[in-house]
Image (cartoon, rainbow, N blue to C red):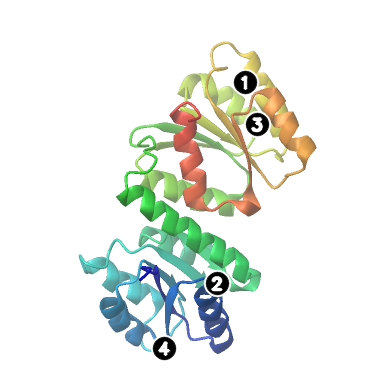
Amino acid sequence: MVNKRKILIIEDDIFLGDVLIKKLQAEGYDAELARDGGVGVKKLAEFKPDLLLLDIILPTKSGFDVLMEKNANPELKDIPVIVVSNSGQPVEINRALSLGVKDYLVKAQFDPDEVLSKVRHQLDQQDHETGGGEKLANLTGKKVMWVEDDKFLSDIISRKLVGEGCKLVHSTSGEEALSLVEAEMPDVIVLDILLSGIDGFEILKRLKENVKVKKIPVILLSNLGQKADVEKGEKLGAQKFLVKATMNLDEIVEEIKRAIDGGK
């Protein structure tokens, strides 16, 4: 008998809960649904899923309560969690990330196929970590320069990177980044393209022209995703071109680790 991966959904929205469980079961997962936080905590201990999909606002116990109880249980604390919530407020996202959540989806942008993609990614990550898959660099002590003027995204990635043990140098403009890079000498630079003042392409060009910093790997992370943009970034020397809409936090961290590993 095939050993199905187990997924628990704790969600009180009847429509969304039904959509998720049908979608996951149709894909061959052993999926169960709880519509109440208190019931969800009990089912989590009984079912011991490989992944938890969790709402935040729930009857009886909130998603945060569920996370805290899960984290306090040695048998459950390592189960990866993806939050699916009505709220996209930075304070709630930051709190969820501080409690170990792997990814955070906002219901207003809900797409069942995107949820399925993120579920697959998290389970693949779990397989790598437990089954001798690809071993990537440890970020502890590594210095990451993050050039991004979106405060919301910067707050989220900053917390994630600091949680990985790395040192973060954040810049909101190209001019500031270029003035900091030689003094900081980061292990990797993550660079947005659409910035006020000098754009990311021009920053990348100048970095690669500077003999002191030209060997520092640069990852372009942008809302732009046209073939011409990707080709331009590669031609200018970017090690990787990532499109924000298609990446989650763990995938971004993976690419940072690969860049430090030399692009493996």
Label 2 or label 3, whichever comes before in sequence order: 2
Residue located at (37% from left, 48% from top): 128
Residue located at (69% from left, 22% from top): 205
Which residue in the protein does label 4 denote? 59
Q: Residue furthest front?
A: 1
Measured in 3D between alpha carbons, the distance from the residue under mark 2 to the one under mark 3, in whole angstroms, is: 32 Å
Say which quarter of the image contains residue 220. top right
- The answer to whether mark 1 and mark 4 are in CB contact below 8 A is no
Q: Please give left or right for residue 153 compared with residue 233 in the image.
A: left
Residue located at (57% from left, 82% from top): 16
Secondary element under disc 4, as helix, strand or loop, is: loop
**Image position, residue 212 (x, y; %):** 54, 12
Label 3 or label 1, whichever comes before in sequence order: 3
Which residue in the protein does label 2 denote? 87
Q: Amino acid at mark 2?
A: Ser
Q: Nearer the viewer, mark 2 or mark 3?
A: 2
Which residue in the protein does label 1 denote? 207
